[in-house]
Amino acid sequence: MKKQKTLARYFEFNKFQTSFTTETIAGVTTFLSMAYILFVNPSVLGDAGMDKNAVFTATALVSAFGTLIMGLLARYPIGVAPGMGINAFFTYSVVIGSGVPWQTALAAVILAGILFVLLTLFKIRNVLLNAIPQNLKMATASGIGLLITFIGLKNAGIVVKNEDTFVALGDITAPHTLLAILGTLITMVLLVRNVRGGIFIGLAATALIGILTGLIPTPDHVFSSAPSLAPTFGVGLSHLSDIHSGHLIIVVLTFLIVGFFDTAGTIMAVSHQAGLIQNNQLPRSGRALFASSSSFIVGGILGTSPANAYVESSAGVAAGGRTGFSAVVTAIFFLLATFLSPLLSVVTNEVTAPALIVVGSLMASAMGSIEWKRSEIAIPAFITIIAMPLTYSITNGIVLGFITYPILMTVKGRFKELHPMMIILFIIFIFFIPFLSS
């Protein structure tokens, strides 16, 4: 009882009219809403040649670390974990698309994390937040969503390559493709019905159906000790000296930009939902950003793509979460999840495809916030969005969109509205154009 009173005082339960029980339920709800990343992230980074078991452990540990910092230091009901979209950039744009070894890509993650921490500590974050127009932020999120969905469709066998038309509809009567389609429908129904943890439940249901139909082998056991981090731990640190080319510097900047704005936008959105914003200001925003930026570094060291705040935390807020204690509960469950690695064997491409497709569609909804009636804004936004799935690269979309925007704004006579940082990025990306095709 005394411990509960101490927790209540530290997390200000009375101020936010909440309780130990409510916050605990909210924390569990947030975990269930985020838990799919434990299985999807190893699948995505596994395509980059990384050890899936090590990535599973790294994902669980960095999620526990970042969420715990968010709960204890920033005292917000927000979970932190390796981000969807940025993990796709890590694998499909950097490693596969550009031929960068995954070891070097991890080094880029660590370096981006260090820059993120410096931006936070020296309070430069507001400059960067104000530099990039809201329309381009929304376009970036939307483009990443389309790319993630495209990857999910490909993994499901719904979309296949075609020599004449580049892509075509796959054999949707194939058993494994039918499993992915059924899993996607189940996940969609759960989300439409506002079922908490719908994506995770959809993933679990798809795996179970696969096992019952014999399409997926039954795991020997469910629990085991946490897989070793040896294949990935510290590898990024030993490859920091690899970051010396213009191409890799752009990779670092992309990790930084995407991670920073994804985290900042999510923190603001979830905090607004929870009623935590005061006088249009977010108290302890620097601490919240530090939780994510420090997770960048820890994740890179452990062996995973950048971590950021999760919008799925809104499920916990909807369940009554208002304080950092719910995040502490979420962190504890991520630690416990390290013993579930045997389930990785049943999480095949067909099982993770529904999560990718649905999460991508949720991210693509940001298109609704773009000013489509203004050509000087709509065209750069469209280029940013469409270039990502069609070139299989988040970097290409950002570079092409961020180059087009200042040009069209200038032609329109709105040059004075451009932030100096946008001019600097324009110049940097102009020099980067020769590297895009490589």
Image (cartoon, helix red, strand yellow):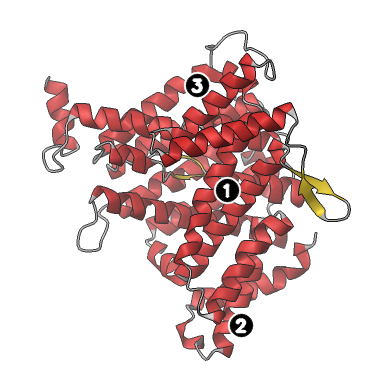
Viewer-closest of 418 and 236: 418
Question: Badge 2 local density, few (<14 within 10 Å), some, or many (20+)?
Answer: some
Question: What type is the residue that disc 2 sits on?
Answer: Ile
Residue 113 visible in the current orientation: no
Q: Residue beneath label 3, please?
A: 338
Earlier sequence position, callout 1 versus callout 3: 1
Viewer-closest of 319 and 38: 319
> Which residue is rendered at x = 54% and y = 64% of the image?
139
| Whether label 1 touches label 3, CB < 8 Å | no
| Whether label 2 touches label 1, CB < 8 Å | no
Question: What type is the residue that disc 1 sits on?
Answer: Gly
Judged from the image, the secondary structure of the residue bearing numbered disc 2 is helix
> In the image, residue 186 lies at what x, y percent?
52, 32
Label 2, label 1: how many angstroms apart (C-alpha)?
27 Å
> In the image, residue 119 lies at what x, y percent?
44, 59
Question: Badge 1 local density, few (<14 within 10 Å), some, or many (20+)?
Answer: many
Judged from the image, the secondary structure of the residue bearing numbered disc 3 is helix
Question: Badge 3 local density, few (<14 within 10 Å), some, or many (20+)?
Answer: many
Residue sitting farthest toward the front: 173
Q: Nearer the viewer, mark 3 or mark 2?
A: 2
The quadrant holding residue 32 is: top left
Q: Residue beneath label 2, please?
A: 407
Question: What type is the residue that disc 3 sits on?
Answer: Thr
Q: Is residue 319 left or right of residue 18?
A: right
| Whether label 3 touches label 2, CB < 8 Å | no
Label 3, label 2: how many angstroms apart (C-alpha)?
49 Å
> Which residue is rendered at x = 41% and y = 41% of the image?
312
Above or below: residue 346 compared with residue 151: above
> In the image, residue 94 lies at what x, y percent?
70, 50
The quadrant holding residue 78 is: top left
Q: Residue beneath label 1, please?
A: 85
